[in-house]
Amino acid sequence: MSFRTNYTVNKTPRFSLLSEDQKARIFRGVIKTLNDTGAKVVHEEVRELLAKNRCKVDGNRVRIPPEVVRDALSSLPPTTTIYSWDGQEEMCYVEPGRSYFGPGPTPPNFIDTETMERRPYQRKDATIVARVCDALPNIGYVQSLGSIDDVTHALSDVYEFADMIQNTRKVIMNWAFNVENVKDEHRIGIVMAGGEEAFKQYPNFIHYSEPISPLTSDFDAIGKCYYCAQHRIPQVYTPCAIGGATVPATHAGQIIVAMAESMVGVVVSQLLNPGTCILIGGVQSILDMRRTIYSYGAPELGIMSAMFTEMLNYVGLPMYSTSGCTDTKKMEMQSAIEAAFSIHMAMLSGANFVHDNGYTESGITGDVFQTVMDDEIIGMSRLICGGVEVNEETLAVDEICNVGPGGHYLYEDHTMKWFRKHWQPTLMDRNSYEDWDAQGRLTMKDRVIKKTRDIIDNHEGPVSRVPAEAQKDIQKILDAAEERVRSK
Amino acid sequence: MAVDFGKMADLLIAGKVEDVSNMTQEAIDEGLDPQEVLQNGLIAGMDVVGQRFKACEMFIPEVLRSAKAMSAGMDKLRPLLSESQAKAAGTMVIGTVKGDLHDIGKNLVAMMFEGAGFKVVNLGIDLDTQVFVDAVKEHKPDLLGMSALLTTTMPRMGEVVNALKEAGIRDQVKIMVGGAPVTGEFAEEIGADIYGANAASSVDKGREAVGK
Amino acid sequence: MESIMPDMQPMNQTVQETPQFRVLTEDQIEQIYFAALDVLERIGSRVHQDEALELFRNSNEAVVSEDKRVRVPASLVERALKTYPRKITLQGRNGKRSVALQKDHVYFGTGSDLPFTYDRKTGERRRTTYKDVTDAARIVDALPNFDFFMSHGIVSDVPNPQTYDRHQFMAMLEGCTKPMVVTSVDGEGLEDLWKMACLFQGGEEEFRLSPMFVAYIEPISPLTNDHSAVEKLLFAAEKGIPAMYTPCPSSGATAPATIAGMLVQSLAETLLAAVMCYLKNPGMPLIMGGVTTVMDMRTTTYSYGAPELSLASAANTDISKWLNLLMFSTGGCSDSKWLDEQAAIESTLSLLTAFLSGANLVHDVGYIDSGVNASLESLVMNDEIIGMVRQVGKGIRTDDEGLALKVINEVGPGGEFVTHDHTYAHWRDWFFPKLMDRSDWETWNSEGSKTMSDRVNEETQRLLDTYEPQPIDDATRKGLQEIIDAAEKRHSK
Ligand code: B12
């Protein structure tokens, strides 16, 4: 039944920091910077590729003209699907309007899940993080929250991936020291997918690498980008720009630099393999001018990330954003505030992959308890960003008139049908004071710890379903890598 | 055809008000002992509802639906129960005190007690002390519930307790109080018997206090 | 470094000075509005007050039934809606017109009347006192991100519940010079508070131009208007006192379980008040409101931390702007019993959402335990959060100075910006944390490994120990006392 015409709805709330004119201005800034200032590219093969394709190369400085940027942008894939390790399930769509939240890569330390002490990240932690993330409903993809200290250091990236991919069906975003190690990881992905062809069809990981601000692509970073593009491995090429230190102190200036340096990766990937998936974005925050740390809790992080997301939407690139992280040393009130702030900003802006949920101490320590707390925040933020459904049924005029002044809705069929759409907390306490008191006056932190440990004790993850054959093959890859490192 | 108490309980758990009512009638028509219908059908079902609620498998609207089914069944049974049996199911009078218009919390408590088989007389809100006294005289309830959500109206509950004493009927009822600013200590101070922090725990405490 | 050549200035540019945020389209808002009008025509709202019923009857348009239900045609509602002011500027007792309520200006403040407080010495929960209210008032006066004050706690150590509001207002005035939102027992109570405020503002007329407070008044959802609420509203209308009529529905219990349905019902309640005030005194300063949230279906708690509170409030604010009414909204509050991570999260999400929505007065900042417990520390914590939230409102600067292309080119690949003049000129635009720690591990340990709770606690104590608000002069104080004494006398029987 429709009496209506000319009707639009906000399916979800609309949020934006920039007008069309502002976006155009910033984008022209990126184009001008790439064309006039250019970027340093410390990789001969890549420079040759760029020189062959209309870029101006002068020493290791590469200037990229607007038309090259435009061509790269126009060959990006509108959507890419990433799969569970066995290719059975579609896990992520890299496309506008989809947001996946996950932890981040590589802090040196970890909060021990038993002792709660800060200590170097160990191999077993990778499995813990994978399993915990596997169990959390609002975590969409997985990173390790550390770099393993108790294996051959040069291979900690490979070990991490080898363990994690067997312990969660969610998509893993891995990282690597160099191209050799990416190759190992690629092999592991292929083993898990069931062969090279299967991996091409059903990629099961995303690779993460970083240019350096300002405007520098070092040998390993751009080398990895090159390799991933060649093999059509979905990848992230994103800097950690430090406002007032490695980029300008004004947000627009910062995003121009960050976008320009990342664009090198975009151009290289599309020249090599048009249509291969690449995301940019990264950590966008400021240098705290009193304590000289790179702030993971500053509101500027949320603001600039949201702004960057908008810019990338404008040019058709997917955004790899940041949230759920903190400058404080442990999970506590401050980390709750900073995480809630950045998660909500990322969600409002519609960033696609949002990392660092579970970073404490400004990225120095990984804390899976924080990830568990972030999971709850993400759920709340998702509800708010889910908007209000307005139609005849939800408007409930008949119900309002039936209940009438002074009545109540607890017996209504309408209530029975709809109340389950209310968000259900798993960590937020809504007990009466007496019940809370009687149950031992638990604070949120107590409940987070309990929930995390419950998951660690009880959620096995998919590891038992990994074929024995694949496990053996992965071990072979690790052994070969050890051999390679030893022989160097 | 024998009445299947298991099915009756299931219907009650599923909140099928009419079905439970009809099935109770069938059981009556078949000449079953009303006390047995109550125990093995209705109360058995409500016990499961209570457990599921505590396990977070059922939520308030569902519990209330079941409670309504329970009370629909009770309406059929009550006239047939012997006086002592009917009395055994329990009666409650409840209301919000003078000057206080908060309604929904008290209504929730009332509905949950209905679900526990009580006959509940809901007096409303903003009630003079005398209304409580008269209601206790008239209905001779096992429980008198009073609700106050304001610091300023809370003392009214003490006034009611005193008025009941003066009327010489204080000992006829157990007095329950509740509402946001009310505490166990306050309940004790004014000489009430039970403090209820929320609807679910109030029913447990209330039943225990009057042995129902 | 701004470009000085006029021909380098771009033309036809729009910039977003602040972020843009909307939950509903105009079409959706209209749908909700028409549904609310439908409710008022079909079932109406019950009014337990004779003068108001008389006003409705005399309108010759509203229909008053035997059961005191008032039904109102759309035409009357629409006429009433045209009369309300789009701007109200509040002036504190410090003489500053610091709260300029107008479209998309956002101000933050406390809530009122919390029965309990955690004692700062014993850590135990106890009833809130006069001194607690004065302390909260001082803290709010001192904190830069609070713009207005509601009592936070209720003064439970006063002689008579019928006159508690005068004492409470006095406690508020003692500690705080900022504009306020006040609760009152009834019409007579509101009149006394208004007289007290007029002593500061310089009389009734001055109060109308620069009111010190807004009167907080509520209907009872669903669709009921009790005697004292209406009495207050009509008194406010008569005297031109700004008033809000703010429904507190709980979705699933006293309102439909859908957010849209809850908004329809709340709007119907608001529109009825709009008509009532219009009939009494067209154009009185009425403010729309709403604490629109869910009842938790496990615990029966009226949830102050639910994400639905944020979403529904933001949608409600969209509606208020479309109606050209000012908006009283909610944020910075929590269901947590303790000032912990939960309180931090719920406060942050609701404050950020409320700010983005552009609600004019965001209240209940600092509530814990679902509006039952007071916490001075929570006020201090929230002050920091509001600071962060306001940072979002600064928007992104995209002039030449903001784009910094010349600077980028100058520094070039591999360079640094720390020593550049451009950084020197702009880093102060960033948020300055007061309570957020950004030290490194070593420093943090050497400084005592403090958590944010520790710092919040210390800051609260520091403010309590040191902050003195501008005092009330003796003459005014005497006048205030007279009003209070007179009230006590009237009510002592
Ligand atoms: C919704 C609400 C209202 C609505 C009520 C609508 C309605 N239909 O009931 C309206 C808007 C009308 C309202 C009005 C006012 N309110 Co009011 N209100 C609330 C609020 C936000 C939620 C109450 C609620 O519905 N909770 C959900 C229900 C399901 O829970 P509940 O009522 O607590 O009941 C449960 C238990 O307490 C217990 N229980 C309750 N009663 C009983 C009785 C027995 C016998 C037992 C065993 C158990 C029991 O079981 C219930 C179910 O689990 C509370 C804050 C809060 N969290 O309590 C303030 C609150 C109670 N209100 C408050 C105030 C100040 C007022 C006003 C004075 C405001 C004003 N100045 O205009 C007016 C007073 C009007 C009046 N004369 O009564 C204050 C009280 C402060 C104080 N120290 O006294 C509170 C605490 C909020 C605050 N901090 O300001 N309010």
Image (cartoon, rainbow, N blue to C red):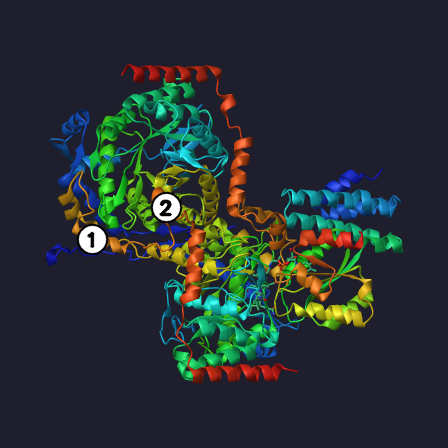
Q: Residue A249, how many percent across, how many down?
A: 23, 49
Q: CA distance from mark 1 to mark 2?
A: 29 Å
Q: Mark yes or no: residue C324 visible.
A: no
- Badge 2 residue CB within 8 Å of ligand 1: no
Q: Residue A64, how many percent across, how many down?
A: 16, 36
The answer to whether residue B152 is left or right of residue A298 is: right
Report the chain holding disc 2: C
Using the image as rendered, state which of residue A278 and residue B98 is in the foreground.
B98
Q: Which residue is mark 1?
A: C424
Report the chain holding disc 1: C
Comparing labels 1 and 2, the label whose residue is closer to the camera: 2
> Of the residues shown, which amino acid type is indicated by label 1?
Tyr
| Label 2 SS | helix
Q: Where does ligand 1 appear, by image quarter? A: bottom right
Q: Which residue is mark 2?
A: C446
Residue A389, label in figure: none
